[in-house]
Image (cartoon, rainbow, N blue to C red):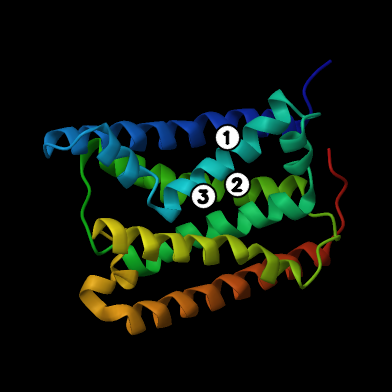
């Protein structure tokens, strides 16, 4: 029996998404080693970024339904609500990077390649995956608020982590540079934009009902 189009797409896209995550994992560990730090420091840095965490979520959303569809995780990632939530989060990653962060640094070589995969290629692949195979017309407006729980938890985590280790993953929430008040305002503003993006996703979903293959 031949694989369905959605399954074939998921397998191919998963390979690309995992390549970006694993390359960044290697680069984070290598950078930590080059700066005289250990593996632990590299892991803390790697898992400190919303980009990395969300790309991992994309990898799981592509992979688990293919390898273990009947598992609890497989059933979760086979729900339109879950797929749309991941699509919203990874779209936010791409948009936030493009408009807020792409001029902050100038990666080269392997880091540039990882950067393009994580911020542009994987977001485009997953949003297209959602558009092609997961628009069910079942999403609710409140879903946009529910999806925002994830970045809210991340912002709290990033602030607590930064306070403990003295390093923040993004300049716009770097309390040591801009102060807690400005960091909180920036976080709230970004959460508001995230909810608006989620509302847009729900609106697109409600425009057409498509069978899930």
Q: Which mark is residue 13?
A: 1
Q: How many marks?
A: 3
> CA gap, disc 2 to disc 1?
8 Å
Q: Quadrant of the N terminus?
A: top right
Can residue 131 be seen from the camera position used here?
no
Helix, strand or loop status at disc 3: helix
Instruction: Provide the residue designation for mark 3.
Output: 54
Eye-nearest disc, 2 or 3: 3
Residue 170: quadrant of the picture: bottom left
In the image, taking residue 89 as reference, residue 203 lies left or right, namely right
Helix, strand or loop status at disc 2: helix
Are the residues tagged 2 and 1 within 8 Å (C-beta)?
Answer: yes
Q: Position of residue 40 (x, y in %)?
A: 29, 36
Residue drawn at 56 percent across, 70 percent down = 194
Q: Is residue 163 above or below residue 191?
A: above
Q: Nearer the viewer, residue 189 or 124?
A: 189
In the image, taking residue 153 as reference, residue 146 lies left or right, namely right
Upstream in sequence: badge 2 or badge 3: 3
Residue drawn at 46 percent across, 65 percent down = 156
Q: Position of residue 188 (x, y in %)?
A: 48, 79
Estimate how packed mark 1 is, as few (under 14), some (14 to 19) or many (20 or more) residues with alpha carbons within 10 Å.
many
Q: Which mark is residue 126?
A: 2
Estimate how packed mark 2 is, as few (under 14), some (14 to 19) or many (20 or more) residues with alpha carbons within 10 Å.
many
Are the residues tagged 2 and 3 within 8 Å (C-beta)?
Answer: no
Estimate how packed mark 3 is, as few (under 14), some (14 to 19) or many (20 or more) residues with alpha carbons within 10 Å.
many
Residue 100: quadrant of the picture: bottom left
Q: Nearer the viewer, residue 45 or 62?
A: 45
Upstream in sequence: badge 1 or badge 3: 1
């Amino acid at each position: 029996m031949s694989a369905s189009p959605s399954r074939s797409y998921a397998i191919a896209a998963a390979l690309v998404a995992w390549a970006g995550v694993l390359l960044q994992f290697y680069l984070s560990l290598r950078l930590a080693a080059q700066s005289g730090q250990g593996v632990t420091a590299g892991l803390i840095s790697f898992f400190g970024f919303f980009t990395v965490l969300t790309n991992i979520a994309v990898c799981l959303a592509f992979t688990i339904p293919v390898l273990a569809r009947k598992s609890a995780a497989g059933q979760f990632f086979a729900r339109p609500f879950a797929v749309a939530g991941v699509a919203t989060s990874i779209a936010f990653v791409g948009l936030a990077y493009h408009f807020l962060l792409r001029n902050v640094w100038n990666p080269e070589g392997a880091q540039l390649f990882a950067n393009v995969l994580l911020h542009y290629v994987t977001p485009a692949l997953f949003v297209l995956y959602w558009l092609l195979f997961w628009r069910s017309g079942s999403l609710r407006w409140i879903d946009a608020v529910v999806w925002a729980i994830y970045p809210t938890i991340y912002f709290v985590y990033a602030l607590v982590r930064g306070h403990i280790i003295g390093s923040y993953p993004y300049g716009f929430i770097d309390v040591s540079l801009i102060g807690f008040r400005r960091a909180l305002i920036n976080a709230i503003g970004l959460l508001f934009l995230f909810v608006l993006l989620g509302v847009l996703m729900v609106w697109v979903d409600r425009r057409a009902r498509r069978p899930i293959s």
